[in-house]
Image: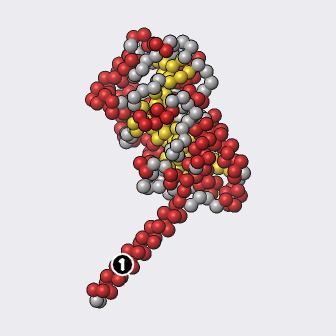
Amino acid sequence: MKVREKGAMFVMSVLAVAALACSTAAAQAQTGNLEAAKKEGKVVVYGAQVPQAMEGMHKGFEKKYGIKVEYWRGSSTQVSERALTEWRAGRPGFDVVEGNRGVQLIMRDEGLFTKFIPPSSEKFPAQFKEKDALITPWRVLPISILFNTELVKLTEVPKTFDELLNPKWKGKISLPDATRHTTTAQFLWNLSKFKGDKWLDYVKALAKQQPILVESLAPVTTTIIKGEALVGITYIKYVKQYKGPVSYVLMDKYLTDPNYMSLSGKAAHPNAARLYIDYACSEDGQKAIAEDGEFGLYPGIFPAIKDAEKVVPNMVFMDNPTEEEFNKLMSGTFRQIFFAK
């Protein structure tokens, strides 16, 4: 065969591969078929979002498409446990799973998801675009100190996590149980970004403050509002999503966790699920969650929280322990620190 012919064949093969890649990417980026989605009638979502934070978006989605959203809420840990249990039993009940990166990666690696890139996510910052197309970021969750505005004077509010170690806060801090809650285990582990090798010393000192340990991050806010705790470590967004005397501390840096949506590999309502994920990432969907206090990823949209625009530039994104590291932290390190007699 002549060199020219070989060269032509090589170019043709490269173009064919490129065309196939483009067509695959295009297929992954397509939204669900609207007519098929309407026939499916509903989408079943398992999520870590409190229902009040999803209400505006769900109403907008149902109004636009006439498709009902069935939403089951638990902590990210509970969401993943339920989804994994159903999947392993061969009876997955979810079309879409929403949760933090750590548990999403665990579910991804077990094969729960299929590829889908929502077209509306194209405007998101490049750093959030997942190459494998199996998990889609749609919001971020900065963590700060929340406090009861009626019981804590502004002059006494702890301005840093180190100030929580002051003896006056002993027994008055609310914190999720890091032996049961993956995001809290992840947060404590990521304190190394601020404290280096001394992060574990800080966790031990925090445990000596005898914090009120709750199931997940949402109940931290409830304990603060009720006055059972005066301060707590949780998401900033809850100052908008819970009614009561609660505010947050403006800090110079915020450990932050992106949250993701994923399409079930065995979705009973696949077209409705694709529409749902695409709507969550759209300008309308992102405006709806911003009104409910969420930090989305759509450019120029900020949550309806005082000084939210000052929070965004100072977010530090958390790394993710492996599943093995999570197990070691939660069942070993943190159990010893918080529960050793």
In the image, residue 87 lies at what x, y percent?
53, 49
- Answer with left or right where residue 43 lies relative to residue 102: right
Above or below, 218 against 340 in this view is below
In the image, residue 308 lies at what x, y percent?
51, 32
Residue found 45% across the figure and 72% down from its top: 19
As rendered, which of 329 and 234 lies closer to the eye?
A: 234
Q: Residue furthest bottom?
A: 1
Q: Which residue is mark 1?
A: 11
Inspect the image, locate mark 1, and give the three-letter code of the amino acid beneath it: Val
Residue found 58% across the figure and 52% down from its top: 278
Tell me where residue 194 sits by quadrant.
top left
Helix, strand or loop under label 1? helix
Q: Residues within 10 Å of mark 1 (few under 14, many from 20)?
A: few
Q: Residue furthest top?
A: 168
Residue found 40% across the figure and 38% down from its top: 317
In the image, residue 33 lies at what x, y percent?
64, 61
Q: Looking at the rendering, in which quadrant would you find the C terminus?
A: top left
- Answer with left or right where residue 16 lies relative to residue 243: left
Above or below, 225 against 4 in this view is above
Q: Looking at the rendering, in which quadrant would you find the N terminus?
A: bottom left
Tell me where residue 252 sits by quadrant.
top left
Above or below, 95 against 208 in this view is below
Residue found 33% across the figure and 33% down from its top: 193
As rendered, which of 293 and 30 lies closer to the eye?
A: 293
Above or below, 199 against 18 in this view is above
